[in-house]
Amino acid sequence: MSFRLVVCVKYVPDATADRRFAQDTTTDRESVDGLLSELDEHAVEQALRLAEAIGDAEVTALTLGPDGAETALRKALAMGVDKAVHVQDDAVHGTDVMGTSAIVARALELTGYDLVVCGMASTDGAMGVLPALLAERLGVPQLTLLSEVGVEDGVVRGRRDGDAATEDLRAPLPAVVSVTDRSGEARYPSFKGVVAARKKPVRRLDLADLGIEPGTVGLRGAWTVVDHIAARPQRRAGAVVEDDGEGAGAGQLAAFLAAGAFI
Amino acid sequence: MPVTATLDARPSAPKGLLAQLASIVGGYHVLSDPDLTAGHEVDWTGRFTGPTPVVVRPRNPHEVAAVLRACAQYRVPVIPQGGNTGLVGGGVPRQGEAVLSTTRLTDLEPVDRLSGQVTVGAGATLAAVQRHVREAGYDIAVDLAARDSATIGGMVATNAGGLRVLRWGPMRSQVVGVEAVLADGRVMNRLSGLPKDSSGYDLTQLLVGSEGTLAVITRVRLRLIPLFTDRVTVLLALQDTATALRVLALVRGSVPSLDSAEITYADGVALVHKHLRLPSPFRTPTPYPVHLLLECAAQRDPADDLIEALERSPDLLDSAIATDEPSRRALWAHREGHTDAVNAAGVPLKLDVAVPLEELAAFEQEVRGLTVRHAPGARLVLFGHLAEGNYHVNILDAGDRDEELSEAVLRAVARRGGTISAEHGIGVAKARWLSLTRAAVDLDLAAVTKRAWDPEALLNPGVLFSADPA
């Protein structure tokens, strides 16, 4: 049987756009463009490289997200992923990472996997905990924040760069790994890739398919509650140094720089 | 003589003039201290520089007129200067002229939705105007890499081209009106922007490309285009220039949303990768011989047309597609990084030429040959706007062969029926070669025109004309 790689990808709002929040304190996904999270592109890239190295392997991209999340799956498919799974359900609205991990874990069990590949964090939530939660829920080992990853003889190996040391790790398969942006440049889709992507299958699943009770996820099922959202306060004008025409301003400027330890 | 050199060879302005200028714009906007004028005295390439006795910064057309009258009174020649991003030495002092900085002429009028036009100050940067009109749901058709510094007035004065000439034409096609001040202080206001006006000579269009020699442009009225929300950028790896032209011909006819077609070569791409530390977009260890960047813009998914046109092309060695903003910017960086990368590697000899498309592939080979022959140690970096047959020729380490090499390349251009300056202008850098591609009758008419607008030869002397036409 082919080695089954599943890469988890997230469709996130464009970080450079003006993001807004809805009345229920969830992110307003309608008003901004979304894209495949840049850090997840590295996960897709590593999954593709592993598949190339293994030979008889198949890569599936899996996402939990609204309609627009299909864009993220299409990009992954255009990069070379073989098929995609899109979990979508209205009751998912407002789910936090506890709910997300429960849903994604069930989807992984349903599709089957030998190795799950994740990015190091999403570029919107930026919590970085999903890989660990998935491993816990699935009951498999996790090797996170890898800059290098490889598979051989039923074992996944990886390298993790820490502040004080570099670790070489390994774990028996099946397992969950996450890869950092140092793991290698993500490829661009090619024309061939985009054309081929149109014919690749996208399987749609909802909570019922996964056997998940709606009340356990969504806003009501969340373990955390967003109390309050406020826009970042406007930047206040900084101190203005006016020169008296005789150059005294230079002294004030120097004093300011020194006081702030800028010089 | 109105301008005198001091003992340390810096020119000084007549005291009366400095006082008069201060009374017009305020003392704060009259700079004569060498430390303050220094930034205005050298151009972006570093090749052209000269001291100025004064930099004056008027705030509105009224002040511009008063400044010019004052300079005329003291017979001090004036260099109009915008963002100082020009590449032919047309915006910096040479013989002790005064500098009139337009950078405070930045007013942006509200977008006129009835006509799809907007009037802006000549000192507004392209980026500022882009932001302004995009907020209103429009766009300005010309875009270029120097957008954060280049001013609209300067772009009009040089008939700037840029990245979207393929679809929208150069600056000339965007200008529907100007307001400009003559050397004697008279103001010419042609800002109404009427699409149809058959009432005599088109003085507005004469100012486009006049490089500050006929009048100082103070305001510009521009036609706008719709703001397209969907863009696709592709980078194609190809074998050679002839192939790139074949691909261009293919898409030009079948993809109406095509905005840009930019060509780069392996040596320039390698320099960009090294200088900007950009990873290669393709998974090959060395760059392909030719990269062609195409961009399409539409209201809805322009990728389909492009893919349909190209998917069966046998010429593509490789391809990279980007539809989301970060990926598109990353692909563009391979092209837009060329100027910075070349500048980081030295002070390049820069030529900006265009030849008819049927000559382009042969011309490319000829330029490579000429570089090797005239300046054996030099490094040639070519890149440019494919659809206009416009190469930016950059030559590093030409040493003392740069004059010789420039002349050889420009003569080759002339032989092939091209232009010695496609979008950078003539400035002082190329005035002496203008006769290669402009006939005697053209040059005579130009000299007469200059005398008519600026009889005292006060505006940008030395630009466009290699000898004083008066």
Image (cartoon, coloured by chain):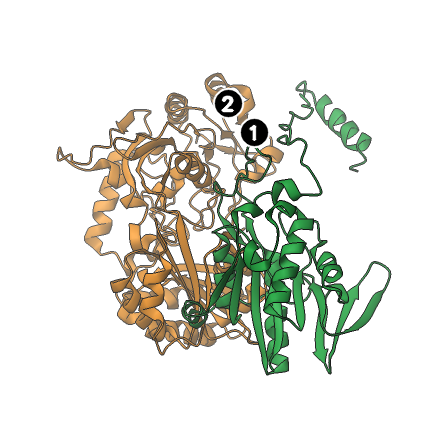
Chain colours: A green, B orange
Q: Residue at x 45, y 25 (%)?
A: B58
Q: What residue type is labelled 1?
A: Ser
Q: What element carries label 2?
A: helix
Question: Vertically, is B117 above or below B253?
Answer: above
Based on the displayed image, in which of its 4 quarters is residue B366 positioned? bottom left
Q: Quadrant of the N terminus of chain B?
A: top left
Closer to us: A18 or B426: A18
CA separation in Å, label 2 and label 1: 9 Å
According to the image, label 1 marks what residue?
A: B32
Check the image and report above or below for B45 versus B199: below
Mark 1 element type: loop
Q: Where is residue B220 in the image (x, y as percent from the top left)?
A: 33, 34
In the rendered structure, which amino acid carries the disc numbered 2? Leu
**Can you say whether B396 is above or below A19 in the image?**
below
Image: A120 above or below B115: below
Instruction: Indicate which disc residue B148 carries.
Output: none
Residue extending furthest toward the right: A164
**Which of the two labelled residues, at mark 2 and mark 1, occupies the earlier sequence position?**
2
Residue nearer the viewer, A239 or B183: A239
Percent position (x, y) of residue A54?
Answer: 63, 81
- What residue is pinned by disc 2? B18
